Amino acid sequence: MKVLMLGWELPPHHTGGMGIVCYQMCKQLARTGAQIEFVLPYTADFSHIDFMNINPALPDDVEQVIGGQAGSTYDSQYFEYVLGDGSTRGAAMSEHQSNFATYAARLVQMGDYDVIHAHDWLTFRAALAAKQASGLPLFVHIHSTEYDRSGGNSGNPLVREIEYIGLHLADKIFAVSQATKDTIVREYGIAPSKIEVVHNAMEFQAHELYEDVSENAFHYLERMQAHGYGVVVSAGRLTIQKGLSNLLQAFRKVVDVRSKSLLLIVGPGEQYHELIEQAAELGLSGNVIFTGHLNGTGKQWRDAFRAGNLFVMPSVSEPFGLTPFEALAQRTPALISKQTGVSEILHSVLKVDFWDLDEMANKIVSVLDHKDLEETLADEGHEELMKQSWKKPAEQVLHHYHRHAAEHRELAYV
Amino acid sequence: MSEVTQRKRAIVLYLHVHQPYRIRHYTIFDAGRTHDYFNAPEGSRENNADIVRKVAQKSYLPTNERLMRMIEHNPQFRLSLSITGTVLEQLEAYAPEVLQSFQNLVATGRVEIVAETYHHSLAFFYNRYEFESQVQMHRDIVRRLFGVTPTAFRNTELSYNNDLAYWADQAGYKAILCEGWDPVLGWRSPNFAYRPAHTENIKLLTKNYKLSDDIAFRFSNREWSEFPMTVDKFMLWTKDSWDQPLINLFMDYETFGEHQWEDSGIFDFLEHLPKAWLATPEHTFMTVTEAAEAYDAADEIDCPQTITWADTERDLTAWLGNKMQQGAIANLYGLAEMIMQSEDLSLIEDWRKLQTSDHFYYMCTKYFTDGDVHAYFSPYETPYEAYIAFMNSYHDLKYRLAEKGFSV
């Protein structure tokens, strides 16, 4: 099985969950024998990845493409082209997407591929160009839609248009959750039978797990815990989709009944300043701590999860949501909104409707006040996490590859 | 004061000298580990030594040199200075030659030092006991470095209300300074000495903001219809109030060379001012206490609300206008009792350095989008960075208290 995979990011240069999912899924697919050509929109050192070929999509006269800054994968992004003579020039998102498409269309004709697999709208123009050039079966993989990213609104019409065309012309759609499948059916008018739910998994390497016993980077939080403080952590992009504004309101209620409570908010995003002001307006200046951007593969990032007594993902709309896995990996219990894809598969976590501020506060206080609850959730959650594997999701994907590849071959011989 | 002096018109030039201890990029990872909030690495925007040395070269040294010449060449020239404790400390450490030049000025006997809080804080509005401690600390350092005891008072950012005047009167000051703000003065002119409501002895001197700001803010503004400003033009404007005794020119000392750069001609303006003014025999200069003693109060001024010399609102909103600022300062003063009980001098001093009003000014979101004067004076990229660095320092203070067994 030879796959042309079109992605937008891979660790460690990732800003969202999509990069991690692509990496882990491809690794499992490769284990089962799939040969993967992975096309990325930027150049970087990927010598640590040996299970697939990685191709940066280079326009003709360009030697190197330097990607946009952190936190921008889903926003408008800016690329820098390094030309043959060493000079550089900037390229806007639309120009680079178009070059990416030209590259993909050329590459697909040079290899003996069986399928094309594209991740999210950013790669859809390239996916369609490749399909048009080759006629191969196209799988589009939906990690999030514009509907989700705009917090349940219509979002950017141009992005929606690209999503719409990609979804309609795809031979099969993989959705990361049932909720995402429902969204695609409802918002984009796609037949349910064309969509397969492939839940994400998350596999950790030993050094990423709780066994890390070195001193926590958040020394202050650890010490304040010793003085009776409870620490709540939330991490991710600070966008409307993530529902942090609700968490702040719920946290006001928490502090009202339990003044020794701290909330650590990790991450960059367009709501950064807005949330700082909101925390101050709620009188939470002394209780809410903002770190800004932390490297998603670094120790500080993991330590943020490790430092919390509870991790909260209050998302308004979350197709999947990998961060609870990261919390459980550090044996930190998780409270997640029911409006997340991951809540379909995780059981040893607390769940709440994102709008139910009283219940959110109630559950936070319960965990902070009751060590036995915290420990039970941590142990059970960790155990559940350790059972996570890409084996089943990868089998699902392969199954559909084979079916569509076979159909395609039959059609070709007719 | 003789009868002759009393009939003379006087310019009261009062300059305010201040530098805060700017907080470095202090992160949550530093909290609980290092307590060096004010120790930015060399070359960074918040490095206090760099800033003090830069301002010394651009403003303090060249201005003091001219002030000294003005004193030497004009027997009637005098002025008043307020110099905060936080800048005096930094001058001692990073630019002793500047401190020496201030000492030389004061030694002439024609430069009055005005009292204020050591830390340039807003303590008066949050903690009266702490406020008085800081005024005492300032008194002590002025005595140690200049050998004089202040007799006039000004509060941080020229903030003023009836309560402050009452306090200063009770404390024995002869003069107190405030903005000559129209809503407070009403029909009155700022060019007289006044009696603050409910006081017995103290006199109130009000800033002539029109003429002061012509120098401090508008001097180099090419959009200004009066640009370029000259000494002759300025003298003409002073004639509008020919029958009034005082012209209170109150401004930041850093106007000279830092806010208005040397190439604007500000130094020449300053140096030529005394000669032009004193060319008229009925003119003189006075320090603030001299002016308060020379003239009777023309009327009583009632000011229940707090006014300052900042922005078009002349209130405290540049420091306490948004919730970040209010939260930050309320949390800081909330630690007061434990901090004092700790008897840990370095902890107390760090807490006091965090009270400096500049920290709250950097968090100002008023006009943030215009990138105006507030942004110019901030070493931080945004008000939010300023807030985060401040609150992380606050968390570390809490940590230090907790480690000492306080229930924070």
Image: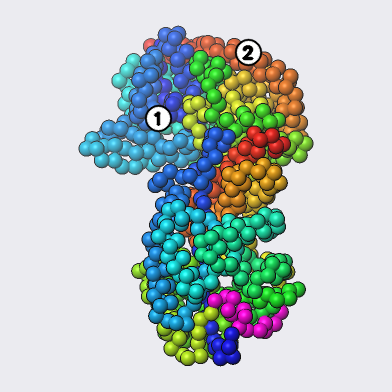
x and y percentages locating residue B36 in the rendered image = 52, 42
Can residue A401 be seen here?
yes
Q: Chain of mark 2?
A: A
* Boundaries of the magenta span: B287-301
x and y percentages locating residue A361 in the rendered image = 74, 33
* Mark 2 / mark 1, whichever is N-terminal: 1
x and y percentages locating residue A367 in the rendered image = 72, 26
Is A386 colored magenta in this rendering? Answer: no
- As rendered, which of B142 and A161 lies closer to the eye? B142
Q: Is residue B16 left or right of residue B195?
A: left
Density class for disc 2 (Cα within 10 Å; few <14, some 14-19, many ≥20) is some
- Kindly identify the amino acid type of the residue bearing the numbered disc 2: Glu
**Where on the picture, by quarter, is residue B123?**
bottom right
Density class for disc 1 (Cα within 10 Å; few <14, some 14-19, many ≥20) is many
Question: Can you say whether A89 is above or below B63 in the image?
Answer: above
Q: From the image, which quarter does the C terminus of chain A lie in?
A: top left
State the mark number for residue B33. none
Residue that numbered label 2 is attached to: A383
Can residue A121 be seen here?
no
x and y percentages locating residue B308 in the rendered image = 62, 66
Q: Nearer the viewer, mark 2 or mark 1?
A: 2
State the mark number for residue A126. 1
Question: Can you say whether B97 is above or below A159 in the image?
Answer: below
Label 2 and label 1: CA atoms lie apart by: 40 Å
Q: Residue at x 50, y 74 (%)?
A: B109
Question: Can you say whether B313 is above or below B28 in the image?
Answer: below
